[in-house]
Amino acid sequence: MVSILFVDPVNDPARAPAAVASLLAALDGLGCPLLARCESPQLVHLAARLAPQMVVCGWPVLGDALCGLLADLAPTTALLVVGDDDDATLQRAVQAGVQGWV
């Protein structure tokens, strides 16, 4: 299956720990091994060290900083689990190299 590096939302009280746990449990149920969890400052370093097949970001809002980090990871596949799905946000995500979002 696909190996995962999971990027936790930073200081986001709106995203309950239960929601992150549920997402991680779903990925585990699909047989996707979790290589590590990190916050955005560690993302590029861990991705280079662990070489995940996919980076999953459980963020409610896609900011410029995260877009820049994801662009640095290309060609690693990135999946966003975001609450902000307006056209401008999704266009920025695609430009950063994100291949999918839910």
Image (tube, helix red, strand yellow):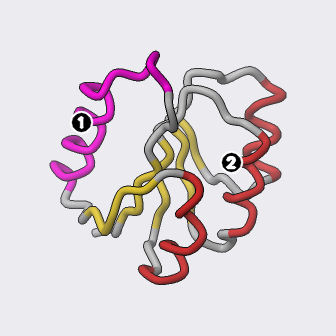
Residue at 44% in and 44% down = 8
Q: Residue at x 49, y 59 (%)?
A: 55
Please give the name of the residue rendered at 26% of the width and 44% of the height, measured from the top-left corner: 24
Secondary structure type for disc 2: helix
Magenta residue check for 26:
yes
Can residue 100 be found in the magenta stretch?
Answer: no
Q: Which residues are magenta?
A: 12-30
Q: First in sequence: mark 1 or mark 2?
A: 1
- Report whether 62 appears left or right of 33: right
> In the image, residue 9 lies at what x, y percent?
49, 37
Asked if residue 70 lies left or right of residue 58, the reply is right
Is residue 102 shown to the viewer in this render?
A: no
Per the rendering, the mark at residue 66 is: 2
SS for callout 1: helix
* Residue occupied by mark 1: 21
Across and down, in percent, residue 44 comes to 60, 69
Which amino acid type corresponds to the residue marked 2 in the rendered image?
Leu
Q: Quadrant of the N terminus?
A: bottom left
Count the numbered circles shown.
2
What is the three-letter code of the residue carrying label 1?
A: Ala
Q: Is 14 placed above or below 79 here?
A: above
The kind of secondary structure the magenta stretch mainly shows is helix
